[in-house]
């Protein structure tokens, strides 16, 4: 009777959760995802000996055994990075946390409960998970513009999923004709993540602002890079990029100052040494640290001999 009553409760819960699971959750590559499942039946799970199981398709990936609200055993698939709260029977929250989401984690998941000794488990929750990846901030390069002539711009972003939409804006509002665009989309080796490059060839003035916009509709995420035509390259930089450029320039300046100071010090020491030598010797040449005595042997031989 207990098993039958428990099964009826679980089926009533399953009907509610299945309706709520029609829309898929979105997991982000490299981040964590929560697959929600809350048991809201009338039965007190802390007084029962039960087992629970999360499945990916038909494959069990996280199995637990509970005895009166205390976890006795948990078995986690080595290829899946999952966690279920040890207080689940007390709170009714059997949600599973999936760590470091991979592209291959996109699947249908389900949660099942079973009374100890019962042959058949009851479906409590079903969750659909789809995966998205964030694209890098676009890199925008622009050829040096000449008024009245065609200018080519390049926009690149990579590492995201699924394939994004990309478009250009002239002076922040106008979209150039599609005939002026060439877009290349390919997957990165061994990752299945996307690399996108768009080329715009357009006749504009040198001070025209051009924007490249990358949209990941699955994440509702928009990335924009803008070139204002002052010089070729990407003008829209992150604060960290400005800091890196400033630090590099500062190091170069300091190195140049130190090198110049050392050369000046060396030259100054050499000049001071030469001045001291000139002051000590006057116009005549001398040798430092040695006094030289010169004998005239002819005059010495002509001196009269004396008896000592």
Image: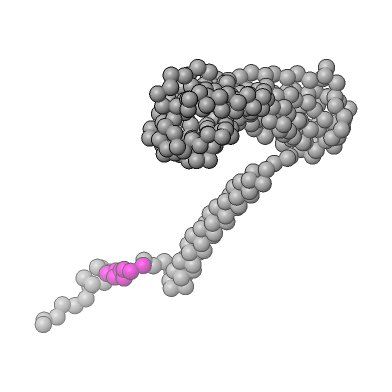
Q: x%, y% of residue 290? A: 31, 68
Residue 241 is at least partly visible in this image: yes
Q: Is residue 253 left or right of residue 168?
A: left
Residue 14 at x, y = what percent? 59, 25
Q: Nearer the viewer, residue 91 or 221?
A: 91
Query: Residue 37: which quarter of the image?
Result: top right
Residue 155 visible at all: no
Which residue corresponds to the image point at 78% horizontal and 26% vertical from the top-left?
167
Q: Please state the extent of the stretch shown in magenta in the rendering.
A: 288-296
Describe residue 97's horizontal placement relative to residue 70 as left or right: right
Location of residue 292 (image quadrant) = bottom left
Q: Where in the figure is residue 123, as x and y percent of width and height?
A: 54, 23
Is 286 or 22 nearer to us in this picture? 22
- 183 up-or-down from 226: above or below: above
Report if residue 220 lies within the magenta region: no
Give 165 or 235, whichever is nearer the viewer.
Answer: 165
């Amino acid at each position: 009777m207990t098993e039958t009553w428990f099964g009826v409760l679980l089926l009533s819960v399953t009907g509610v959760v299945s309706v709520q699971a029609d829309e898929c959750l979105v997991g982000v590559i490299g981040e964590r995802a929560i697959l929600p499942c809350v048991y809201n039946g009338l039965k007190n799970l802390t007084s029962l000996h039960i087992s629970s199981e999360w499945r990916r398709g038909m494959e069990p990936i996280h199995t637990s055994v509970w005895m009166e609200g205390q976890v006795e055993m948990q078995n986690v698939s080595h290829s899946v990075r999952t966690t279920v709260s040890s207080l689940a029977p007390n709170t009714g929250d059997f949600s599973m946390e999936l760590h470091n989401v991979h592209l291959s984690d996109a699947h249908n998941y389900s949660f099942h409960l079973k009374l100890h000794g019962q042959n058949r488990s009851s479906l409590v929750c079903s969750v659909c998970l789809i995966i998205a990846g964030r694209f890098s901030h676009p890199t925008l390069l622009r050829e040096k513009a000449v008024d009245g002539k065609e200018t080519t711009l390049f926009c690149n972003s990579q590492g995201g999923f699924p394939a994004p939409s990309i478009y250009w804006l002239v002076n922040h509002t106008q979209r150039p004709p599609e005939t002026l665009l060439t877009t290349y989309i390919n997957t990165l080796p061994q990752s299945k993540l996307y690399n996108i490059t768009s080329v715009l060839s357009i006749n504009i003035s040198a001070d025209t602002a051009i924007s490249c916009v990358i949209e990941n509709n699955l994440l509702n995420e928009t990335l924009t890079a803008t070139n204002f035509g002052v010089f070729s390259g990407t003008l829209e930089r992150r604060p960290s990029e400005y800091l890196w450029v400033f630090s590099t320039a500062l190091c170069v300046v300091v190195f140049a100052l130190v090198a110049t100071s050392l050369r000046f010090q060396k030259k100054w020491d050499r000049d001071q040494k030469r001045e001291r030598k000139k002051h000590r010797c006057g116009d005549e040449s001398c040798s430092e640290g040695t006094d030289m005595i010169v004998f005239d042997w002819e005059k010495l031989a002509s001196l009269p001999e004396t008896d000592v």
